[in-house]
Amino acid sequence: MSIYNYLDNNFSYDSDTGEVRKIQVTGKSTYIISLPKKWVESLNLRQGSQLIISRKDNNTLIIAPKEVVGSTKPKESTMPVSVKDNIGSIIRKIVSLYLVGYSVIRVKVREDRFSSVHKNEIKGFLRKKLIGAEVLSESSRELEIRVLIGHPELSLENALRRACNIIISMYDDILTALKTLDKNLAHEVISVDDEVDRLYLYMVRQLKAAVENEKILKVSGLSSPKDCLGYRIIVKFVERIADHLVKIAENITLLDTPPKNSVIEKFFEISLFAKSMFEGAINSLYKKDIILADNVIDKVKSISIIENELINFIEKINEPNVPILRLMVESIRRTAEYASDISEIVLNLYIEKSLLAT
């Protein structure tokens, strides 16, 4: 009997769960199931084609053609644009292609030649924001962008650790800049955010690749695509923390005179508290420690009280920089809340494994 005839006799279709198949037994110990005919034909498989069967979690099998699993061919795309297009729109499309895993992006203009302004904007953006993306060739009508770095060169874990280390330094630098009213240092904090953005976009790219590729998933240290979703949210929170630290640095550059020493001391207290919450949240992720994550969530609950006490203190002593300081305190509070959000994701990711281990 051909595989196709056998298939038609041994499955039913459930609209909610997909095709339901019966396990058949040949000999005394061999269990077999038939493959969907449309799936076989769509992938040009035939008798003798090799399949990779891998186990995911505790009860799921993934079946994929060996050629697909082992494929290393880079994804390529050609993106038509016009010199009349908004440069922001062009860049957003390039970022989208980068994030979904394209390694070769050809930006081709419909008119006779590229605008030099557009070319320079694209090149500048690549340098500032996209790790590994370089213009390898260009002509009057086309830019060819290639992504020259991947998981072996910079792992997800290393990228996340680098971003978090930068953020910890940003916490320290904004405190020093505030205490000494060092606006140059504040501007350095603002500029270093570009590196966090670069790492964030790179991590999103890697996580999307891990969802689609079992090998990348395993090398990333993640156990399932569900983990990728959790990490995707975490890296966004990390990026948002950096953004709020940039807002604080920007507000420091607006100060004409340093705040009173008593205000600086209290701002130090809330900032160091927020920093410790971020460190605790990230350590709970590295260690897969739900107890540490739970402690961070509990402690961060007090941040609104600390914020209100500081605002009341600032207003009571007639501090001249009240409007700017209120914005700074709000941003530092938001960083602590994002640390709590990270801890909640850690709890969601590892609670089941923790319970199974007890």
Image: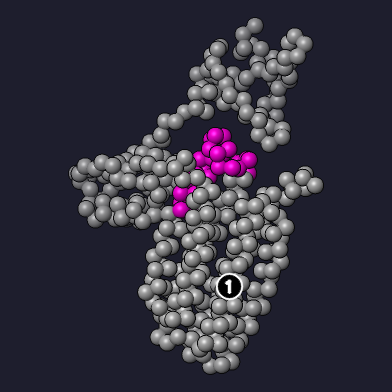
- Residues rendered magenta in the picture: 199-226
Check if residue 237 falls in the magenta segment: no
Q: Which residue is pictured at 30% across the width and 52% down the height? A: 123
The amino acid on which the numbered mark 1 sits, given as a three-letter code, is: Leu
The residue nearer to you, when weighing 101 against 220, is 220
Check if residue 211 falls in the magenta segment: yes
The residue where tag 1 is placed is: 272
Q: Residue furthest top?
A: 1
Above or below — where is 13 with respect to 212?
above
Q: Quadrant of residue 266?
A: bottom right
- Left or right for 12, reference 154: right
Q: Is residue 47 visible?
A: yes
The residue nearer to you, when weighing 266 against 302, is 266
Residue 46 at x, y percent in the picture: 54, 14
Residue 237 at x, y percent in the picture: 55, 59
- Left or right for 186, reference 31: left
Q: Which residue is pictured at 56% across the width and 50% down the height? A: 232
Above or below — where is 224 with respect to 37?
below
Q: Is residue 341 visible?
A: no
- Left or right for 80, reference 8: left
Q: Which residue is pictured at 59% across the width and 92% down the height? A: 316
Residue 329 at x, y percent in the picture: 55, 77
Above or below — where is 210 with respect to 332?
above
**Would you say the magenta stretch is mainly helix, strand or loop?**
helix
Residue 295 at x, y percent in the picture: 71, 63
Q: Secondary structure at mark 1?
A: helix
Q: Residues within 10 Å of mark 1 (few under 14, many from 20)?
A: some
Instruction: Give the total of numbered labels.
Output: 1
